[in-house]
Image (cartoon, grey):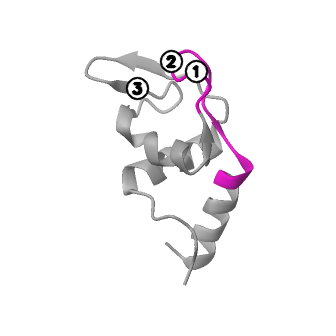
Amino acid sequence: MSDRPVIPAASLRLLRELAEHDAVTFTPMPRARWRHPHTGTVFNDRTFHPLDKHALIHVGDGHTDPVRITPAGRAYLTAEAGEGR
């Protein structure tokens, strides 16, 4: 049994994209959504919450600062890959 939090699929996708494109400044979209500038993927605001809650990402001020994956976020992805998820 693992002590790692269970992360929703959309949040896990976001974490994986941040691992590929660190320090991402998202573009605000209508209805509390954010567009990833490198992939064009649009994420709901709430997609960021579980990652921020568990310190897997750093969102800065939450509006204009780039979003960065933390060492804990990279460790989470490494553990996920080890389990074959």
Q: Nearer the viewer, residue 34 or 6?
A: 6
Sequence-wise first label, 3 or 1: 3
Q: Is residue 85 visible?
A: yes
Q: Residue at 44% of width from left, 41% of height from top?
A: 49
Q: Is residue 61 above or below residue 67?
A: above
Three-letter residue code for mark 1 = Asp
Q: Main secondary structure of the magenta part?
A: loop
Label 1 to label 2, Cα distance in Å?
6 Å
x and y, in percent, of residue 34 in the image: 40, 26
Which residues fall within the magenta stretch? 59-73
Q: Which residue is mark 3?
A: 34
x and y, in percent, of residue 81 in the image: 60, 69
User: Are the residues tagged 1 and 2 within 8 Å (C-beta)?
Assistant: yes
Q: Is residue 54 above or below residue 2?
A: above
- Total marks shown come to 3
Pointer 1: residues within 10 angstroms few (<14), some, or many (20+)?
few
x and y, in percent, of residue 46 in the image: 36, 38
User: Are the residues tagged 2 and 3 within 8 Å (C-beta)?
Assistant: no
The label shown at residue 61 is 1
Label 2 secondary element:
loop
Q: Residue at 54% of width from left, 76% of height from top?
A: 84
Quadrant of the image for the N terminus? bottom right
